[in-house]
Amino acid sequence: MNEIEINTSEHLSDELVTAWLDGELAGEERARVTDHLADCDRCREEIVALRQLLVQNSATGLPVQRRRPIRYLVGTAAAAAAVWFLLVPSVRGPEPRLRDGTSADAGAVPAVMVVAPVGEGARADGTSFTWRAMGRDAQYTLTLTDAAGALLWQISTPDTAIVLPDHVRLAADRAYFWTVDALLADGDAATSGLRGFETAP
Amino acid sequence: MDSNPPEQSTARLPPVLSKLLAPAPGEAARDGAWHAFLAEHDRLLRHVCRSLGGDADAEMDRYTRVLEELRADDFRRLRSFAGDGRGRFTTWLTVVARRVCLDHERSRYGRVSPASDADARSARRRLADLVAVNLDPDQLGAPVTANPVARLEREETRAALLVATSELDPEDRLLLALRFAEDLSAREIAEVVGLPSPFHVYRRLNPILARLRAVLAEAGIEESPE
């Protein structure tokens, strides 16, 4: 990787911010980046917001790669010797509003679980979309797109099953994607994430 | 700085990203790889877009913009992710998605104005309180006064604090900035910088503040009486 110069008149690159947040910087490079963060309001505010997002990502079970242990060098402002800490990646954030995965707290609401259609062999006409309920008074929005991401159909419903209307025609042997977003009675949101299916030949 | 993205070893990239960036036999295969990528990271991207507030339309605007940016120029931005083990792809994706969202907001609504003078004075007041010096914190950032003695004292204190903080290690200066400029709690500071607990933050901050008091005392600025 080419060395990236840090100019105090510039802000940090995507890669440097990423490496700093994941504890992958060391030595003089870490010191330079940390020095910039101490002086630059914009970059410092950014890493505070990003850390909160990353903690929420971890707590909601969003896919994250494995993390290597982080070593944090204690400054010697008042201490006589430098001490290395081996950090355990067990930081938890506040309970996130988006409940779309198992959180570390007991009783967390799971993601919207779709039932059908998934995978291959779906009907091209009269397709029925079904998912599991997210409690009383939840409202659902179903979004259907083609493989290129073009919106084909979107509908809001309090039900957990709905049939594709006649005016929305799917082609045979094609891939389609759908999402169910839920607005729960207590104001929180949940989502199924993107789910794909293929119509039968 | 080299403006070309570094050569990537696709073997080190997450599988869905590796497949997306590999030469595709056709448009359908490329679309399939793109949607496989979205199926894995869609929730993360939407979470980032939602985190900036606003209604569902605003969130979808940002989300659309993020997808456009990631797909632009044959996935140019995704290709810039260096798979050399420094940082996780999901962290990088969170950073990039949030930056794209903020750029989108700025292009539509203009830049957010910087912190006000009142915020800056408030930060200095909190630092002065904790350092426990005998001064009127409101004077640190107050308009120029006609009283030459008060003006001189204010300038001396400001200069002494500036020198004292500038001599700290970057890690310590960042802790001070997080505490007094961002007004974070010890728990929040621990999360940001990667310390195991709020107690580790206190253990680092207390000696820093003690050192600042000592430096100010050497400069002849007395501590306030208890």
Image (cartoon, coloured by chain):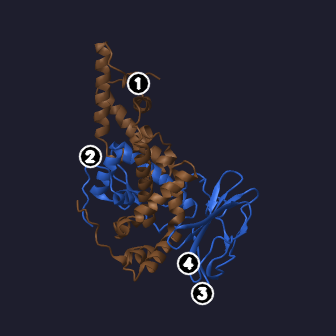
Chain colours: A blue, B brown
Residue A9 numbered tag: 2
Residue depicted at x 29% and y 67%: B5
Which chain's residue wears label 3?
A
Residue reaching furthest to the bottom: A201
Instruction: For marks 1 and 4, give the CA distance.
Output: 65 Å
Q: Position of residue B168 (x, y in %)?
A: 31, 42
Instruction: For marks 2 and 1, give the CA distance.
Output: 30 Å
Residue depicted at x 33% and y 53%: A12
Instruction: For marks 2 and 4, give the CA distance.
Output: 48 Å
**Residues tagged by mark 2 and mark 4 found on one chain of the structure:** yes
In this rendering, the label closer to the viewer, 3 or 2 = 3
Residue B137 numbered tag: 1
Reading the chain from its start, which is encountered first: label 3 or label 4? 4
Q: Which residue is mark 3?
A: A201
Q: Nearer the viewer, residue A66 or A183?
A: A183
Q: Eyeballing the image, is B118 above or below A22? A: above
In this rendering, the label closer to the viewer, 2 or 4 = 4
Q: Residues within 10 Å of mark 4 (few under 14, many from 20)?
A: many
Disc 2 secondary structure class: loop
Reading the chain from its start, which is encountered first: label 3 or label 2? 2
Instruction: For marks 3 and 2, give the CA distance.
Output: 59 Å
In this rendering, the label closer to the viewer, 1 or 4 = 4
- Under mark 2, the amino acid is Ser
Which image quadrant: the N terminus of chain B?
Answer: bottom left
- Under mark 3, the amino acid is Pro
